[in-house]
Amino acid sequence: MIEAENLKKEYHSGPVVTPVLEGVSFTVKQGEFVAIVGISGSGKSTLLNIIGLLDTSTSGNYLIDGKRVNDLRQDEMAHIRNQKIGFVFQRYNLLPRTSVLENVILPTLYNPRMGRKEAEQKAKELLEKLGLLHRLNNRPNELSGGESQRVAVARALINNPSLILADEPTGNLGYKNTKPIMDIFQKLSREGNTILLVTHSQEIASYASRILHLREGKIKRETPSVS
């Protein structure tokens, strides 16, 4: 599903060139749960943004579902982001003045194949599945950190994406709320969802079926999970 070949990313500030990714290559098959683990500054969030079509590489090839990203128009990339990719961020990125229900259905506003009634029904099913149906009309400031992240997971799933990208999804959570979130990702993986997660924590990475170790902009090694 994902094919990355010799991806490089560098930033320019006048004559100063700062390399972030220095030749990253890996693949992710449909239905895999893969973690990319690395310390702060290793390039893992930059890599995830490139995979999620939120950023572009300086050089190298990236294919998603067999389509070379460099050949896609902006509108085609926007379509893939909305229809094929679900994002879960560390800081939840929930709209503070809207209800849980409205936050979850937000991505469907750009989905011409899903009307309002169907979106609300799907959102309620997801929230029930995640144990949050009773929070339907609450606002984000009325939720715990773990509840907020579960809302973010529901939002990521609303358009039935073929790929879920998670950027430090438990970074703001204590242990009590971390395990339930990671259990959800494992359950989604068993149901056939493809998940790519980046984290600085080896413990969080162990929930995945395969771990890529990123250091200094390169994947240094790959290990199977021991969980």
Image: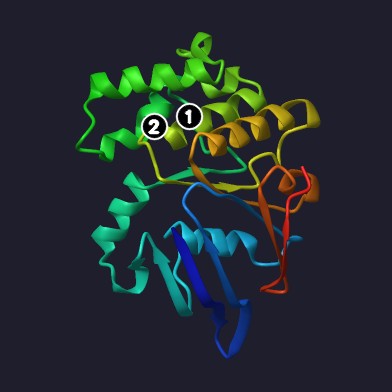
Is residue 99 something one can see in this rendering?
no
Q: Position of residue 180 (x, y in %)?
A: 68, 27
Mark 2 and mark 1: Cα distance apart in space: 6 Å
Quarter assignment of residue 188: top right
Q: Position of residue 20 (x, y in %)?
A: 62, 74
Seen from the viewer's position, the closer of residues 201 and 64 is 64
* 131 is higher (above) or lower (below) than 76: above
Considering every residue shown, the one lying at the far bottom of the view is 15
Q: What amino acid type should be assigned to the residue bearing mark 1?
A: Ala
Quarter assignment of residue 22: bottom right
In the displayed structure, does residue 160 sit left or right of residue 144?
left
Q: Position of residue 100 (x, y in %)?
A: 46, 21
Count neighbours of disc 1 (C-alpha within 10 A) and say few if under 14, some if 14 to 19, many if 20 or more: many
CB within 8 Å, label 2 to label 1? yes
Q: Which quarter of the rendering shows the N terminus?
A: bottom left
**Residue 158: which disc?**
2
**Residue 154: which disc?**
1
Q: Which quarter of the rendering shows the C terminus?
A: top right
